[in-house]
Image (spheres, helix red, strand yellow):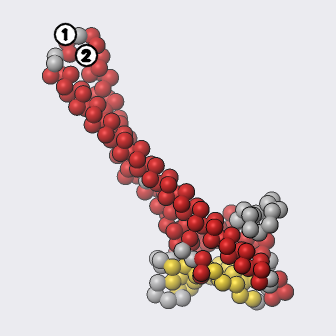
Amino acid sequence: MTDSNSHSEETQEISLRLEHYDDMFSDFDIRPYSKRALSVDFLDEIKRAIRDGRYEQVELVLHIPAKEVSESHQATIRDRLSGHFKRHFDLLLKEKRKVRRLGVSMVILGIVSMVAATVIVFEDPRESLLLSFLVIFLEPAAWFLLWEGMDQIIFNSKSINPELDFYRKMSNSHGHVHFSTY
């Protein structure tokens, strides 16, 4: 069903054979093509093909039987694909920024907690029950916030990268979606 070839040095061609236009969309969604949800299988096939290549540009060639061809459907589907990929790229970019902001906030709070605990230790916390409690509370909180914040920045934000990269490539491919007949 999928055939990946390099079209040029920078462009990866992904060819998918479809029986009809509905193959690209969810079987349960009966809305028109302009609003219809894309099929998970269709998206997975494209992801699988892109994962194998290291190209920045993607050219998507959808092969459809000659008897099924409709220029108006093709224009609508091109716009629908473009809208879907752009929307999901923007959502993932926003999610990655949110994860990074959370991580930076946690690291800053961790450092502030460490500074506060250090200042309290210099005041001799044995003289006050409140100061003693604050040292006991702030030290583990500081380490937790620091390490968990770093985890958010380094690992959790990077776990979004494969999906983000896929949607970035596909959101740039609006002019590179072609239909061919068989």
Residue beneath label 2, please?
131
Q: Along the line of sight, which residue is nearer the eye, 89 or 18?
A: 89
Q: Is residue 104 visible?
A: yes
Q: Position of residue 150 (x, y in %)?
A: 35, 46
Q: Is residue 160 left or right of residue 117?
A: right
| Secondary structure at numbered mark 1 | helix
Residue beneath label 1, please?
127
| Secondary structure at numbered mark 2 | helix
- In the picture shown, does residue 45 fall above or below 116? below
Q: Which mark is residue 150?
A: none
Type of amino acid at the residue the image marks with label 2 = Leu
Q: Quadrant of residue 130?
A: top left
Type of amino acid at the residue the image marks with label 1 = Glu
Q: Quadrant of residue 137?
A: top left
In percent of the image, x 79 and y 60: which residue is there? Answer: 29
Few, some or many C-alpha atoms within 10 Å of disc 1 (few <14, some 14-19, many ≥20)?
A: few
C-beta proximity under 8 Å, tags 2 and 1:
yes
